[in-house]
C-alpha cells in the first residue's frame, strides 16, 4: 500500500472533458478463488496455493489458475495469490483521463492522486491565487460540506504537499491552515509553505486539492498510457488498501 503518490493531478492538469470513470461489477461468472502454480524450493517440483483456501465453510468451485515464474517460496506464492484475488475484488473502479506533458512523466505502476469534479466525490480543486500567512485564497471556492477538511498543494515538480488540516476562512474562497498540522507537514516533507507555493513570474498558480468528510481525491495505480500528439491518455484503477493485506498467513 503506497499512500505517497508520484504526482497530483487536478482538474487544472486534466484535459477538459477527458475524465472517464467506469465500474466493473462482480458477476456469477467471476472466479471465487485464485490458484497460483509455482516450483517449490523444498521439492523442486510443481506446487500450488489457493486464496481464499478451502475450509469447512468454503470450497472453491470456479478458481482462476495463474502460473507465476520465479517464485519458489510457498509463503511468497500465497501472498501473490492473495494479491491477485483481492485486487480482482476491490480494484473495480477504473479511471481514464487525458493530460499534457505530465502524462509523459508517469510510468506503469506509478501511484497518482486524482482530483476531479467528475465524478462529484473526487474532492474539490482549483488554484491558490493568494496567500497571507497561513490563509490561502482559492479559486474557484470549494464546497465546505462536512469536515474534517484537508488540503493538498501541488508542488512545482507535480508532487503534493500535505495533507494539512484546514478550516473555512472569512468566506468559502479562503482556507485557514491549522498551525500544528502545517508545522508537522513542513517537518515531515522538509519544505516550507512558501517554497511549495513559489512560482516563477508568469507561471500558472499552484493547484490545490481539498478533501472533506464527503468528497476526497483518489489514489490510483497506472495501468498503461498512450500518446496522442501533445496529449497523453492515462488508464488507471482506483487502489484500495484492502488489496495490500499484511496479516496473511499460509
Image (cartoon, rainbow, N blue to C red):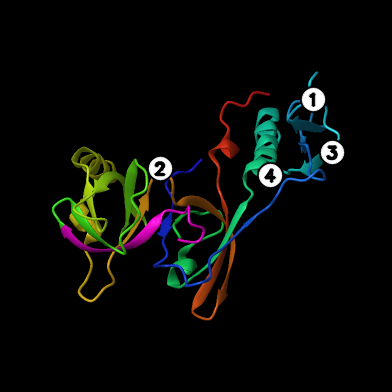
- Judge from the rendering whether residue 196 lies leftward or rightward of residue 214; answer left or right: left
Q: Residue at x 76, y 31 (%)?
A: 49
- Judge from the rendering whether residue 60 lies leftward or rightward of residue 201; answer left or right: right
Per the image, is 119 magenta?
yes
**Cα distance in 3D space between marks 1 and 4:** 18 Å
User: Are circles 3 and 2 on residues that touch, CB within 8 Å?
Assistant: no
Q: Nearer the viewer, residue 126 or 222?
A: 126
Residue 234 visible from this viewpoint: yes
Numbered circle sitting on residue 88: 4
User: Are circles 2 and 4 on residues that touch, CB within 8 Å?
Assistant: no
In x, y percent, where is residue 43? 79, 27
Q: Residue at x 13, y 53 (%)?
A: 133
**Other-residue count near label 3 (Cα within 10 Å), few / some / many at <14 / 14–19 / ≥20:** few
Numbered circle sitting on residue 62: 3
Give the magenta-colored segment's residue range.
Answer: 117-131
Query: Is disc 2 placed on a helix, strand or loop?
Result: loop
User: Are circles 3 and 4 on residues that touch, CB within 8 Å?
Assistant: no
Front disc: 2 or 4: 2
**Cα distance in 3D space between marks 2 and 4:** 27 Å
The residue at which mark 1 appears reads as 58
**Cα distance in 3D space between marks 3 and 4:** 14 Å
Q: Which mark sits nearer the N-terminus, 2 or 1?
A: 1
Per the image, is 184 magenta?
no
Residue furthest toward the left? 133
Q: Which mark sits nearer the N-terminus, 1 or 4?
A: 1
**Cα distance in 3D space between marks 3 and 2:** 39 Å
**Other-residue count near label 2 (Cα within 10 Å), few / some / many at <14 / 14–19 / ≥20:** few
The residue at which mark 2 appears reads as 213
**Cα distance in 3D space between marks 2 and 1:** 37 Å
Query: Is disc 3 placed on a helix, strand or loop?
Result: loop
Amino acid at each position: 500500500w503506497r499512500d505517497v503518490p508520484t504526482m497530483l493531478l487536478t482538474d487544472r492538469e486534466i484535459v477538459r472533458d477527458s475524465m472517464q470513470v467506469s465500474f466493473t461489477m462482480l458477476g456469477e461468472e467471476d472466479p471465487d478463488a485464485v490458484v497460483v502454480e509455482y516450483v517449490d524450493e523444498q521439492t523442486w517440483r510443481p506446487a500450488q496455493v489457493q486464496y481464499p483456501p478451502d475450509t469447512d465453510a468454503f470450497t472453491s468451485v470456479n478458481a482462476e489458475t495463474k502460473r507465476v515464474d520465479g517464485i519458489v517460496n510457498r509463503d511468497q506464492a500465497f501472498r501473490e495469490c492473495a494479491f491477485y484475488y483481492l485486487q480482482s475484488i476491490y480494484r473495480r473502479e477504473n479511471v481514464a483521463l487525458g493530460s499534457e506533458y505530465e502524462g509523459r512523466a508517469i510510468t506503469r505502476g506509478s501511484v497518482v492522486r486524482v482530483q476531479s469534479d467528475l465524478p462529484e466525490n473526487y474532492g474539490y480543486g482549483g488554484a491558490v491565487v493568494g496567500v497571507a500567512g497561513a490563509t490561502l485564497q482559492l479559486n474557484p471556492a470549494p464546497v465546505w460540506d462536512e469536515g474534517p477538511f484537508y488540503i493538498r498543494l501541488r508542488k512545482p515538480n507535480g508532487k503534493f504537499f500535505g495533507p494539512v488540516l484546514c478550516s473555512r476562512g472569512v468566506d468559502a474562497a479562503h482556507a485557514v491552515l491549522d498551525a500544528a498540522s502545517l508545522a508537522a507537514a513542513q517537518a515531515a516533507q522538509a519544505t516550507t509553505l512558501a517554497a511549495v507555493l513559489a512560482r516563477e513570474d508568469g507561471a500558472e498558480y499552484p493547484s490545490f486539492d481539498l478533501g472533506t468528510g464527503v468528497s476526497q481525491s483518489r489514489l490510483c495505480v497506472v495501468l498503461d498510457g498512450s500518446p496522442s500528439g501533445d496529449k497523453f491518455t492515462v488508464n488507471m484503477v482506483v487502489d484500495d488498501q484492502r488489496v495490500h493485506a499484511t496479516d496473511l498467513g499460509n
